Amino acid sequence: MMSYLTISMRTRPSAELDAYVEAFVSRIASFDKRTVRATKVLINRIGIAKGDELLASNRAFFQALTQPGTLNRCSKPRGLGYGKRSHFALNFGKALKSFGS
């Protein structure tokens, strides 16, 4: 979820703001609901994890990776070459918006 927090802090020209927010919300909404809920609870509870909180954050992250929605969502990028040197992996940011639910 950190990448989304970083992206959301960028400034946007007023003319682009509505489209950006719509795309951002659609992207978050496309994730497994349990994973989004667990991430939101964790961030609301501790903010950005530090020290001992980092362990709880890591456990929550790896637990989220076992959810059926997450497993299903991760299969497409892996099939396209994510995780190994490939055109897809090197241009992942450009391809990211094409991944829906």
Image: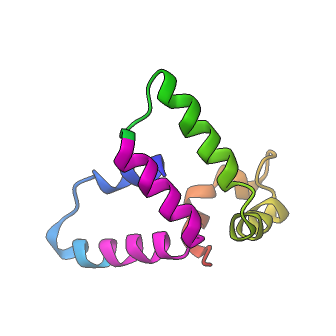
- Say which of 101 and 37 sits in front: 37
Q: Residue 59: give x, y in percent of width and height.
A: 64, 40
Q: Main secondary structure of the magenta part?
A: helix
Which residue appears at 43% of the width and 54% of the height?
Answer: 41
Q: Quadrant of residue 32?
A: bottom right
Quarter of the image that includes the C terminus: bottom right
**Magenta span includes 24:** yes
Which residue appears at 48% of the width and 75% of the height?
Answer: 29
Q: How many marks?
A: 0
Q: Give above or below for 19 relative to 3.
A: below
Q: Which residues are magenta?
A: 20-45
Which residue appears at 61% of the width and 66% of the height?
Answer: 95
**Magenta span includes 7:** no
Which residue appears at 75% of the width and 69% of the height?
Answer: 68
Q: Residue 99: give x, y in percent of width and height.
A: 62, 73
Q: Is residue 74 left or right of residue 61?
A: right
Q: Residue 25: give x, y in percent of width and height.
A: 39, 74
Query: As drawn, which residue projects farthest toward the left?
Result: 14
- Say which of 101 and 96 sits in front: 101
Q: Quadrant of residue 50?
A: top left
Q: Give above or below for 92 relative to 14.
A: above
Query: As drawn, which residue projects farthest toward the top?
Result: 51
Q: Is residue 79 left or right of residue 91?
A: right
Name the colouring of the figure. Answer: rainbow
Q: Is residue 89 left or right of residue 92?
A: right
- Say which of 88 and 39 sits in front: 39
Q: Residue 73: give x, y in percent of width and height.
A: 71, 69
